[in-house]
Amino acid sequence: AARPAGELRAAPVQDWQWQSCRDARGVDHALTLRSTGGLDPEVLAAALADVVARHEPLRTTFTERDGVLYQRPAAAPVLAVERCAELDARLAELASLAPDPAVEAPLRAHLLTAPDGGQALLLTMHYLAVDEWSVVPLFRDLVTAHTARAQGLAPGWQPLPVGYADYAHWAHEVLGDLADPDSRGGQQLAYWRRTLDGLPDRIALPADGPHRTGPDTSVRPGSHVGFVLDEALHAAVDRLARATGTSMFMVLHSALAALLTGHGAGTDLPVGTMVAGRTDEQLSDLVGCFFNTVVLRTGTAGDPSFTELLTRVRETTLSALDRQDVPFDAVVRAAGLPPRGPQVMVIHHEQADAEQLEGGIGSLSAVPTGVTRADLTLSFYEPQGDGPVHCALIHATGLLGTAKARQLADEYLELLHRATAHPEQPLSELFTAPSKRSDNA
């Protein structure tokens, strides 16, 4: 579709990200390329300028008028260069400082150099401009531009088939009027009203104390504990997924639901997840906000076997994916969900080719931002081969401390081992001490 002239309306899925940002500002993700030294600031600055010029969301600000969100051009972010006394401390400090997307582009870039010569290129980003699935094209293009600029050349990449503003205009056309029951958006909204009717506002999550709750905002202080599914457990998960016609996401999601039920969270569990939203191949190389949040209503009532729970989760997930287009903020209003967003999330990442994203600049890693959107999030990276699966439990620190989160991660691993070995057993038989203890029952 032709792009309209003048100020451009934001994409439908950007409304929820804007509301979250207005509610409590925070960086959604921070990534760093670390090097032992030798990075040329001028070359990096030129490469960053190339990438920002290629992807318009990186040079966009937002304004809201009469309840409608608009995107408008902004000054392009530039590389900030500084020396610091301690690299890790400065990275953590910068990762906690969020730009205001109403007045500046939703990307910041810093090149830090430590006294020993070690360097780190840090990018801090909002989902408004760079969603989870944008990380690969962003860093891939940065590597391409850096390689070219280091040789005194401009990057020779192919022009993008469409721009983000083209997508935003198209997305509104596809959804139609959400108030029209015959439009695509209206039909999907009706599904979500039916499916989420009577959903619990909150569930009783494991906590450090019986009366502790996280703050009632969409962004809250957070931390995480990491853990790993080794190659053997990864293989067991894959075997179970193949045998049941499910996926790694569905198996890990089901195990989390079983664990929470065992801890007294109930049998009607709203579990949020992210969907990529890149339904057209032309969107695969773009940087921007395409993803949406959906709520998977997960039922564990009747003490089902783990296999039966997988069947339920499969049906719920596939049905939700068929209605993933309507923006989450519209679902929140229509279904009467809490405006803060899902209390529990499961997020599936596909592990990218590190060499493709690092390109000799440095080793890529995430920097904790110190905030989270949910009280409890299971995040995992599905590897390309048979290697280990790296996972994290991200938790609101107002609800859980590190020790309790570590205990939950250990219990989760134990339950997953039992579920993959004996999927025919009912959930009650999969709980063992200490996971059989319920803090909230």
Image (cartoon, helix red, strand yellow):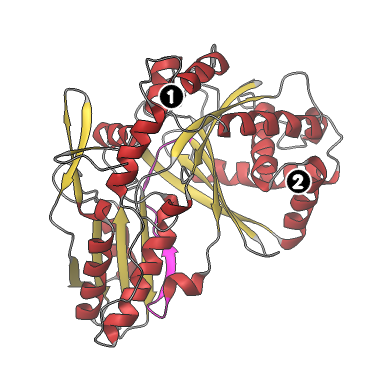
Q: How many marks?
A: 2
Instruction: Place residue 338 in its image quadrant.
Output: top left
Q: Is residue 368 magenta?
A: yes
Q: Image height check: is 261 above or below 139?
A: above
Q: Is residue 29 left or right of residue 152?
A: right
Specify the principal SS of the magenta part.
loop
- 197 or 262: which is nearer to us? 197
Q: To which residue does mark 2 refer?
A: 241
Q: Nearer the viewer, mark 2 or mark 1?
A: 1
- 64 or 371: which is nearer to us? 64
Q: Residue at x 35, y 21 (%)?
A: 177
Q: To which residue does mark 1 refer?
A: 185
* Quadrant of the drawing holding the C terminus: top right
- 380 or 140: which is nearer to us? 140
- 333 or 174: which is nearer to us? 174
Q: Residue at x 64, y 44 (%)?
A: 249
* x, y percent for residue 137: 40, 62
Q: Is residue 384 left or right of residue 166?
A: right
Q: Image height check: is 311 above or below 211?
A: below
Q: Image height check: is 75 above or below 143?
A: above
Q: Amino acid at mark 2?
A: Ala
Q: Seen from this angle, which residue lies furthest front?
A: 2
Q: Answer whether residue 100 is visible to the viewer in this image.
A: no
State which tag comes first along the sequence, 2 or 1.
Answer: 1
The stretch of residues the image draws in magenta is 359-375
Q: Amino acid at mark 1?
A: Gly
Q: Residue at x 36, y 40 (%)?
A: 221
Q: CA distance from mark 2 to mark 1?
A: 32 Å
* x, y percent for residue 281: 48, 52
* Quadrant of the drawing holding the N terminus: top left
Q: Residue at x 40, y 28 (%)?
A: 175
